[in-house]
Image (tube, grey):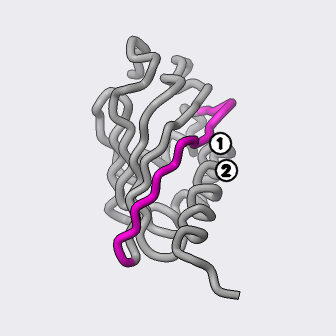
């Protein structure tokens, strides 16, 4: 059975959301490209190491983490995915913004997201994240 690129991206996103919720650093390490850059809800940037450390140390916890309203555009083995991210959790004891717009750029077959962007647009914009 062959899979369509959309199926691979959907599987990647499912695995990613499960890994984020479960603080599965091993899976996230496999999924994120070595030069991964994450952009937080307040505009700060995170390297792959920073991203993984938030989970490994337990500083970041999610009670809820899901993606809705997914829109996918494929360009060869790269895709641009925009979505509405719904979260409930804390970072270092501070509440996370509950709703954000997110852009993911997965490349290849279910691995290697080089960019994760969480720009403003969350409905909890006054939330401070140190």
Give the residue at x 52% y 17%.
Answer: 94
Residue 65 among those drawn in magenta: yes
Q: Is residue 18 above or below residue 34?
A: above
Q: Position of residue 41 (x, y in %)?
A: 37, 30
| In this picture, residue 32 sits left or right of residue 65 | left
Dominant secondary-structure state across the stretch colored magenta: strand
The residue located at (68%, 45%) in the rendering is: 22
Structural distance between the alpha carbons of marks 2 and 1 = 5 Å
Label 1: how many Cα within 10 Å (few below 14, some 14–19, many 20+): some
Quarter that holds the C terminus: top left
Q: Which residue ends up furthest to the top in the rendered image?
A: 126
Query: Is 74 one of the magenta-colored residues?
Result: yes
On the image, the x and y values in percent for residue 93 come to 56, 19
Left or right placement of residue 109 versus residue 80 in this view: right
Residue 97: percent from left, percent from top: 48, 23
Q: Are marks 2 and 1 in contact (CB under 8 Å)?
A: yes
Residue at 57% across, 32% down: 86
Quarter containing the N terminus: bottom right
Please tell me whether mark 1 sits on a helix, a strand or a loop.
helix
Helix, strand or loop for disc 2: helix
Viewer-proximal residue, 88 or 29? Answer: 88
Q: Which residue corresponds to the image point at 44% horizontal and 67% vertical from the top-left?
A: 112
Callout 2 environment at 10 Å: few (<14), some (14 to 19), or many (20+)? some
Task: State which region is magenta.
Answer: 61-76
The tag on residue 21 is 1
54 vs 76, nearest the viewer: 76
What label sits on residue 18 in the rendered view?
2
């Amino acid at each position: 059975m062959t899979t369509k690129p959309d199926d691979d991206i959907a599987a990647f996103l499912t695995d990613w959301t499960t890994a984020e919720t479960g603080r599965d650093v091993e899976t996230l390490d496999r999924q994120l490209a070595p030069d991964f850059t994450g952009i937080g809800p307040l505009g700060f940037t995170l390297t792959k190491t920073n991203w993984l450390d938030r989970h490994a140390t337990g500083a970041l916890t999610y009670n809820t983490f899901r993606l809705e309203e997914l829109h996918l555009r494929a360009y060869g083995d790269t895709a641009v995915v925009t979505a509405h991210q719904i979260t409930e959790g804390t970072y270092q004891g501070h509440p996370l913004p509950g709703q954000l717009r997110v852009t993911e750029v997965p490349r290849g077959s279910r691995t290697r997201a080089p960019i994760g962007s969480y720009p403003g647009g969350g409905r909890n914009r006054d939330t401070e994240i140190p």
